């Protein structure tokens, strides 16, 4: 987990929204490789192993799949991943292409339940979770996999910023407040409405 992205993590347990506290046991190139992400409200502790944050030990994860240049280019173009400040959430199978996307784009990638074998590091952060454990309006772009549960879909929509872009396979229903921009034979791309101002990001707190 990239240290700068700890700010946008949120505890998935039902209680008021708060930032989480990172205890870092091993850090490499600004990635927390080993440690714990703790919730100051409910005291839940989420382990970080091999750079991956385990919000759930039972999150669905598919088998390894080969990355595709075509899918990576589609993600980078459709989600407008041109800026280093951009944060893109890639859910499920889309995470397979993360390394190639990073070769095309300076944007930071946050993978939710990527296929087995996909590794964190070099701008790629990974969480395993039942619902996307992110602050509201914290992601500039979201790619949603067909395997998303309804709770996962709702949490991914919540994480998308105003005017942010979402992409998903055609058989995934588009959140009704989004506006479709384009579709091809496989995916739709849509934009979130402007309007709701994103909440201020809480200051980063760390436990030594
Ligand atoms: Zn909590």
Image: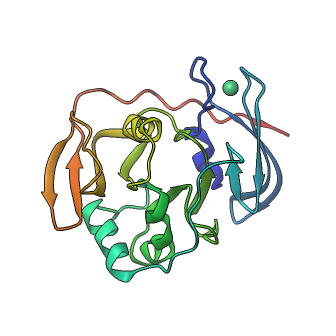
Write down which quadrant ligand 1 falls in: top right
Q: Return the x and y of residue 117 as percentages of the image width and height.
A: 64, 72
Colour basis: rainbow
Q: In which quadrant will I find the N terminus?
A: bottom right
User: Vertically, is 104 above or below 79?
Assistant: below
Q: Is residue 7 above or below residue 41?
A: below
Image spot of residue 61 (x, y percent): 59, 59
Q: Residue furthest top?
A: 16
Residue 86 rendering spot, x and y as whole percentages:
40, 55
- 27 to the left or right of 112: right
How far across and down, in percent of the image, does residue 28 sit? 75, 65
In depth, the one of 191 and 131 nearer the eye is: 131
Where, quadrant-wise, is the C terminus in this rendering?
top right
Q: So how many labels did they put on this image? A: 0
Name the foreground residue: 205 vs 146: 146
Q: Residue at x 22, y 46 (%)?
A: 191
Horizontally, residue 81 falls left or right of residue 170, namely: right
Q: Is 171 on the left or on the right of 150, as rendered? A: left
Residue 38 image-quadrant placement: top right
| Residue at x 42% of width, y 72% of height | 101
Horizontal arrangement in the rendering, residue 32 relative to residue 126 (left or right): right
Q: Quadrant of residue 121?
A: bottom right
Residue located 36% across and 38% down the image: 157
Residue at image position (35%, 51%) is 141
């Amino acid at each position: 987990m990239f240290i700068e992205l700890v700010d946008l993590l949120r505890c998935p347990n039902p209680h008021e929204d708060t930032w989480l506290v990172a205890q870092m046991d091993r850090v490499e190139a600004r990635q927390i490789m080993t440690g714990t992400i703790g919730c100051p409200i409910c005291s839940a502790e989420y382990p970080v192993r091999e750079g991956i944050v385990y919000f759930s030990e039972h999150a669905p994860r598919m088998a390894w799949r080969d990355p595709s240049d075509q899918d990576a280019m589609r993600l980078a173009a459709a989600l407008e991943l041109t800026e280093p400040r951009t944060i893109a959430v890639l859910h499920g199978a889309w995470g397979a292409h993360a390394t190639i996307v990073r070769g095309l784009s300076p944007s930071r990638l946050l993978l939710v339940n990527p296929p087995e074998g996909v590794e964190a590091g070099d701008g790629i952060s990974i969480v395993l979770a039942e619902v996307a454990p992110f602050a509201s309006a914290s992601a500039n772009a979201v790619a949603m996999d067909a395997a998303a549960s309804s709770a996962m879909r709702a949490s991914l929509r919540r994480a998308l910023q105003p005017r942010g872009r979402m992409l998903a396979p055609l058989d995934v229903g588009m959140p009704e407040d989004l506006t479709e921009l384009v579709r091809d034979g496989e995916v739709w791309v849509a934009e979130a409405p402007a309007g709701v101002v994103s909440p201020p990001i809480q200051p980063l707190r760390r436990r030594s």
